[in-house]
Image: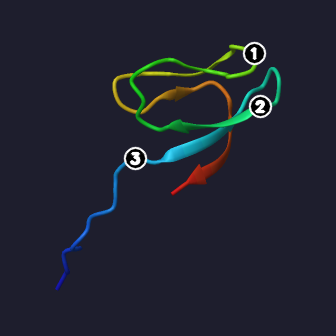
Amino acid sequence: MKKKELIPKPQSRFLKVKCSKCGNEQAVFERSSMIIKCNVCDEVLAEPSGGKIKIKAEVTQVLE
């Protein structure tokens, strides 16, 4: 028999991405609904795509 979890795990998570232009690392939400820009050089790191974001930078770590 399969047991139900009392507290279900979330479907989405945070990602740590590295800017390809300046090397800055920052955390972004996997299902963000707005354009995410680098805090240092204003480069676009991710864009919304109706669900999960379209990542334009290097993902260095998945934060759970």
Looking at this rendering, what residue extends furthest in the top direction? 42
Q: Which residue: 16% across, 86% down?
A: 1
Q: Nearer the viewer, mark 3 or mark 2?
A: 2
Q: How many numbered circles are shown?
A: 3
**At x 78% / y 25%, what residue is drawn?**
20
Secondary structure under tag 2 reads: loop
Mark 1 to mark 3 CA distance (whole Å): 27 Å
Residue to which mark 3 is pinned: 12
Q: CA distance from mark 3 to mark 2?
A: 23 Å
Residue 24 at x, y = what percent?
77, 31
* Residue 36 place in picture, x, y as percent: 55, 22
* Residue 50: image tag: none
Kindly report the distance in space between the C-alpha atoms of the residues bearing marks 1 and 2. 9 Å
Tag 1 near tag 2, CB within 8 Å: yes
Dot 1 corresponds to which residue?
Answer: 41
What is the residue that sits farthest to the right in this orientation?
22
Give the structural element (helix, strand or loop) at label 3. Answer: loop
Q: Which mark is residue 24?
A: 2
Task: Tell me residue 59's x, y (percent).
Answer: 66, 40
- The answer to which of marks 1 and 2 sits earlier in the sequence is 2
Q: Amino acid at mark 3?
A: Ser
Characterize the local packing of mark 3: few (<14), some (14-19) or many (20 or more) Cα atoms within 10 angstroms.
few
Q: Earlier in the sequence, mark 3 or mark 2?
A: 3
Q: What amino acid is labelled 1 in the image?
A: Cys
**Helix or strand or loop: what does disc 1 sit on?**
loop
| Residue 34 quadrant | top left
33, above or below 18, in the image: above
